[in-house]
Image: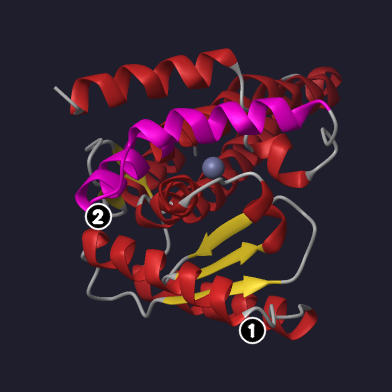
């Protein structure tokens, strides 16, 4: 049973390998890009139905103009790009699979110029280009399968340890895989994002200023969702500075 399960997982994984742009990392994604875009489209409609689009035509046009430049740089033929500005104090922005980008007005207070807005928008677009959402879902599915197999085996051979295995396993997955995994996605989105920004003709030096502004904001608004997934700390700023320096040579 064990061998067949491993073979099955192996076959499953080899059929679903994908390579990220810029960083050329091999990743496992079970979903096809078109399935992913469909999911993106559905969530986009749900989110827009619950949101209030900004009535500020000048700022909305600005977001769309920056977005179009990033979209051209991303060169993704199967994406149907859309850029919207939503009236919301939250410091947040995201790009759904398939190219639906939402920027919240709250971010306009932090991004001090077009280059800084391009920083956060490129970063969000990079998450979608690198298919991070689908990759996370795939990893959760894998860890679910591995957990059930492990649990069945342990329960079969040593039933008294069954629940210990489940607890140890889920703690291990959260601490050992999921958390650093999200940090590595952040670093990768920073890297791809800065390449995109540069390709779109923006000043990548401003990326450092943007994340420094975020760091200053963090004290007052640490409960904000964007800050919990986008920690702006010295390590992040250092990595970005090194990359900007290398690209500006
Ligand atoms: Zn991010």
Q: Left or right of 34: which side holds 229?
A: right
Label 1: which secondary element: helix
Q: Is 76 above or below relative to 227?
A: below
Report if the CB atoms under discs 2 and 1 are less than 8 Å apart. no
Magenta stretch contains residue 173: no
Q: Name the residue under label 2.
A: 200
Between the residue at mark 2 and the residue at mark 1, the CA separation in whole angstroms equals 28 Å
Q: Is 239 above or below relative to 5?
A: above
Give percent across and percent down for residue 195: 26, 41
Which residue corresponds to the image point at 41% horizontal and 47% vertical from the top-left?
A: 115
Which residue corresponds to the image point at 56% horizontal and 34% vertical from the top-left?
A: 182
Give percent across and percent down for residue 81: 39, 76
Give percent across and percent down for residue 185: 47, 36
Residue span colored magenta: 190-219
Image quarter for ligand 1? top right
Which residue corresponds to the image point at 49% horizontal and 68% vertical from the top-left?
A: 63
Mark 2 vs 1, N-terminal side? 1
Q: Mark 1 points at which residue?
A: 45
Q: Left or right of 189: which side holds 69?
A: left
Label 2: which secondary element: loop
Which residue corresponds to the image point at 64% horizontal and 33% vertical from the top-left?
A: 214
Give percent across and percent down for residue 65: 39, 71
Q: Left or right of 77: which side holds 228?
A: right
- Of 184 and 238, the residue lying toward us: 238
Q: Quadrant of residue 160?
A: top right
- Of 239 and 115, the residue lying toward us: 115
Q: Left or right of 197: which side holds 157?
A: right
- Of 61 and 13, the residue lying toward us: 61
From the image, give the main secondary structure of the stretch colored magenta.
helix
Q: Does the residue labelled 2 lie within 8 Å of ligand 1?
A: no
């Amino acid at each position: 049973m064990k061998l067949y399960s491993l073979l099955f997982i192996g076959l499953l994984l080899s059929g679903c390998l994908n390579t990220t742009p810029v960083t050329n990392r091999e990743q496992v994604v079970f979903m096809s890009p078109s399935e992913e875009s469909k999911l993106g489209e559905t969530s986009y409609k749900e989110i827009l139905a619950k949101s209030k689009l900004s009535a500020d035509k000048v700022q909305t046009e600005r977001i769309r103009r920056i977005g179009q430049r990033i979209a051209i740089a991303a060169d993704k033929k199967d994406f149907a790009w859309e850029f919207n500005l939503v009236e919301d104090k939250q410091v947040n922005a995201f790009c759904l699979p398939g190219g639906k980008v939402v920027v919240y007005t709250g971010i306009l207070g932090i991004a001090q110029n077009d280059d800084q807005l391009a920083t956060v928008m490129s970063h969000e677009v990079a998450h979608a280009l690198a298919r991070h959402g689908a990759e996370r879902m795939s990893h959760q599915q894998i860890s679910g399968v591995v957990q059930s197999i492990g649990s069945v085996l342990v329960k079969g051979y040593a039933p008294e340890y069954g629940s210990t295995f489940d607890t140890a396993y889920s703690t291990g997955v959260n601490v050992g895989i999921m958390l650093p995994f999200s940090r590595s996605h952040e670093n990768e989105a920073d890297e791809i994002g800065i390449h995109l920004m540069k390709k779109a003709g923006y000043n990548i030096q401003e990326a450092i200023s943007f994340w420094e502004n975020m760091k200053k904001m963090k004290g007052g608004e640490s409960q904000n969702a964007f800050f919990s997934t986008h920690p702006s700390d010295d390590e992040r700023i250092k990595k970005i500075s090194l990359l900007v320096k290398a690209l500006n040579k």
